[in-house]
Image (cartoon, rainbow, N blue to C red):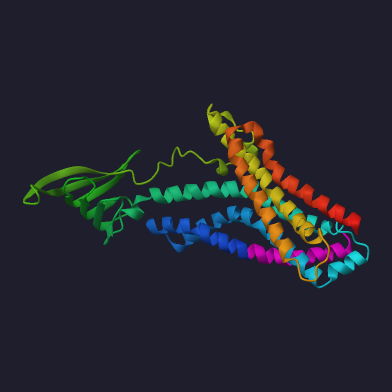
Amino acid sequence: MRQLDRYVLAQLMGPLGFFALIFAGLVWLTQSLQVIDTIVASNQSAAVFLELSALLLPSVMTIVLPISAFAASLFAINRLLTESELVVMMSAGRSPLSLARPMFMLGLVAMVLTGILTLYLAPNAARELRDRTAEMRAELANSVLREGRFNHPVRGVTVYVRQANSAGDMLGIFIQDARGPGPSITYTADQARLVQGPMSVQVILFDGTAQRFEDGGETLSLLEFERLAYDLGPLAEDTSNRRRKPREYTALTLIDPPDELWEGNEGRRAELIAEGHDQISGPLYALAFPILALAAILGGSYRRAGFGRRIAIAVGIALTARIVGLGLVPAVEQSASMWPILYAPPLLLLAGSSAVLWRRGRRA
């Protein structure tokens, strides 16, 4: 690598780290809000929140790295040009196409990192995140057995437990059920036990009473019982046979999905293939964006007034290419044979930017 290329690359790496940190923080903050609801509802600790938030990072970085490489390229090129450093380089015989070498190296680094995240880390992290979230929602002791407070495990049901343990045994339980269209029913019992079945959750009450007002609230109906099974209904999804989303599989599995994943359903197979090729084509944007940034600024003549308009056009082209790439995924989900079109936006972007630089070099 030439010394000049190393200098330009060094000017690019600093902004890359800065923009990656800023964008990652912003995207991670928005994504972590969905985790907070689960943490609060299941009464988990801050350590669990940090664990789940860390599992969000691979997916966040797959979005952030290509954008950061693009922003870093625009920032560094604009600064080098306004400070006349690129003018000196081109006056010394460097063509715009030769200046693309450090941009290509930056894009290559961003593409490799994005590829590692997209093809391996992000699918495994997404799978682990959904598993952990489902497990927490299934831990009923956190949502029902919090003693000394009024709990609302499902809509219309209020549960108060004086004393409880992690095994599901309770002492002094109060349940008010207002789910039905008629009058609410109040259950009280000295002892109870929580039992989770395959489809629902039941509380077995011992030595208690069931109270209900009838005749418009004028008559109190009282039933004493020694044992009563109270059905709370399904509080959480059944995690034993959870169907995994396509993004929870790696690309090598998705591009040629085994029969057990799509079970003869061609729509499901096309969905898996579309996700697989979308994962593979995604890192190509990290390679194309830095070349686009260089072509946008150096594609025309030098302007003392600055390059704000060219930067805005470059941002619009990059945004359009990424939106088109995302818009092509549903088309592949309809017909799996159309998967090559997912590679068209980044490759055309890379080829077009290189052609602009080559033509600019010929005019110089």
Rendering coords of residue 223 (x, y %): 10, 46
Rendering coords of residue 42 (x, y %): 38, 56
Rendering coords of residue 232 (x, y %): 28, 45
Query: Which residue is found at the position 34% from the left and 38% from the top?
Result: 199
Left or right: residue 52 compared with residue 15: left
Residue 336 shows up from this direction: yes
Magenta segment: 1-21
Left or right: residue 221 compared with residue 331: left
Give the answer, above or below, for where 218 lies relative to 16.
above
* Front position in the image: 196 or 187: 187
Left or right: residue 359 compared with residue 111: right
Which residue extends farthest bottom? 83
Left or right: residue 222 compared with residue 128: left
Residue 116 shows up from this direction: no
* Front position in the image: 6 or 183: 183
Quadrant in which residue 8 is drawn: bottom right
* Front position in the image: 156 or 57: 156
Q: Is residue 50 on the magenta stretch?
A: no
Rendering coords of residue 21 (x, y %): 63, 64
Quadrant in which residue 12 is drawn: bottom right
Quarter of the figure with the C terminus: bottom right
* Front position in the image: 283 or 345: 345
> Majority secondary structure of the magenta segment?
helix
Quarter of the figure with the N terminus: bottom right
Query: Which residue is found at the position 40% from the left and 50% from the top?
Result: 137
- The number of numbered discs placed on residues in the rendered structure image is 0
Q: Is residue 2 on the magenta stretch?
A: yes
